[in-house]
């Protein structure tokens, strides 16, 4: 049994993320997968009328493209359903009731935007990693990094691991770059596993200087989850640290209007 205290994502984040997903869902055609004469068929609806649709058969040259749109729509709808259920469970309310009370004001000035996130490459760093710590298609350098990755995924966030970033005088590879597309924003997250060791801190001090000289601010653009050399935070503590990051972005980009 998990005896750790649980921490919830902010309600305004649920509103912002669901709004973002709904916006993208509305851009996609309504597509249902069915059968016709015992063969798979995709029905593409052009209006709310359930009797007006175009059928795309597997033999059609449009099948692959239409099927990808169908998969994309199903994936987005699944995310909306999951977040809506969590929101109801944690806050006993619904998106329909809440979204009118919040205004999302996406990032316009910070260079860590959606375009920046899309351009950086996942797992670009060639530093040695361990096959012992494998999760989500990545091999991590430590159990601590893997635990952070699990927490990020459990909290419905997306990340790129060891993506290269050009700083002031050098290229560096933040452990995680977290995406917040609903805010047109991303942030860096460093996992520091021996902050009680002076040599370790000294070794990493130049890295943070490079971030600062490149215009990235610790606590706003760059966050740190730390530990002692022999003591790692438990899963609930890692969750809490990541939720703090989410909450800080909500404070910047979401405003209550009623």
Image (spheres, rainbow, N blue to C red):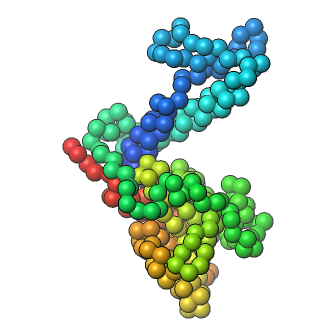
Quarter holding the C terminus is top left
Residue 88 or 149: which is nearer the viewer? 149
Q: Image point 67% across, 29% down: which residue?
A: 65
Q: x, y (%) of residue 245?
A: 43, 62
Q: Image point 28% across, 51% down: which residue?
A: 255
User: Which quadrant holds residue 88?
Assistant: top left
* Furthest residue toward left: 258
| 104 vs 135: above or below | above
User: Which quadrant holds residue 33?
Assistant: top right
Residue 124 or 87: which is nearer the viewer? 124
Residue 5 or 251: which is nearer the viewer? 251
Quarter holding the N terminus is bottom right
Say whether residue 29 is left or right of residue 255: right
Q: x, y (%) of residue 30?
A: 54, 23
Q: Image point 49% across, 36% down: which residue?
A: 24
Q: Image point 33% across, 39% down: which residue?
A: 99
Can residue 174 be seen in this snapshot?
Answer: no
Q: x, y (%) of residue 206?
A: 54, 86
């Amino acid at each position: 049994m998990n005896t750790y205290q649980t921490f919830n994502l902010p309600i305004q984040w649920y509103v912002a993320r669901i709004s973002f997903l709904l916006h993208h869902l509305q851009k996609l055609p309504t597509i249902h997968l069915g059968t016709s004469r015992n063969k798979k068929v995709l029905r593409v609806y052009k209006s709310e009328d359930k009797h007006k649709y175009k059928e795309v058969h597997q033999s059609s040259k449009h099948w692959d493209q239409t099927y990808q749109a169908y998969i994309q729509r199903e994936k987005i709808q699944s995310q909306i359903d999951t977040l809506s259920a969590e929101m109801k469970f944690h806050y006993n309310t619904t998106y329909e009731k809440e979204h009118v009370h919040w205004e999302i004001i996406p990032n316009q000035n910070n260079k860590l935007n959606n375009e920046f996130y899309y351009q950086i490459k996942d797992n670009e760093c060639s530093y040695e990693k361990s096959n012992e710590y494998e999760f989500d298609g990545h091999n991590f350098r430590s159990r601590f990094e893997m635990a952070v990755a699990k927490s990020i995924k459990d909290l419905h966030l997306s990340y790129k691991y060891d993506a290269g970033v050009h700083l002031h005088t050098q290229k560096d590879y933040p452990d995680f770059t977290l995406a917040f597309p609903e805010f047109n924003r991303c942030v860096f997250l460093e996992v520091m596993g021996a902050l009680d060791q002076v040599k370790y801190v000294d070794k990493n001090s130049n890295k943070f200087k490079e971030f600062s000289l490149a215009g990235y601010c610790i606590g706003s653009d760059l966050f740190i989850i730390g530990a002692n050399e022999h003591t790692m935070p438990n899963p609930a503590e890692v969750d809490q640290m990541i939720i703090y990051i989410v909450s800080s972005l909500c404070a910047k980009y979401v405003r209550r209007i009623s």
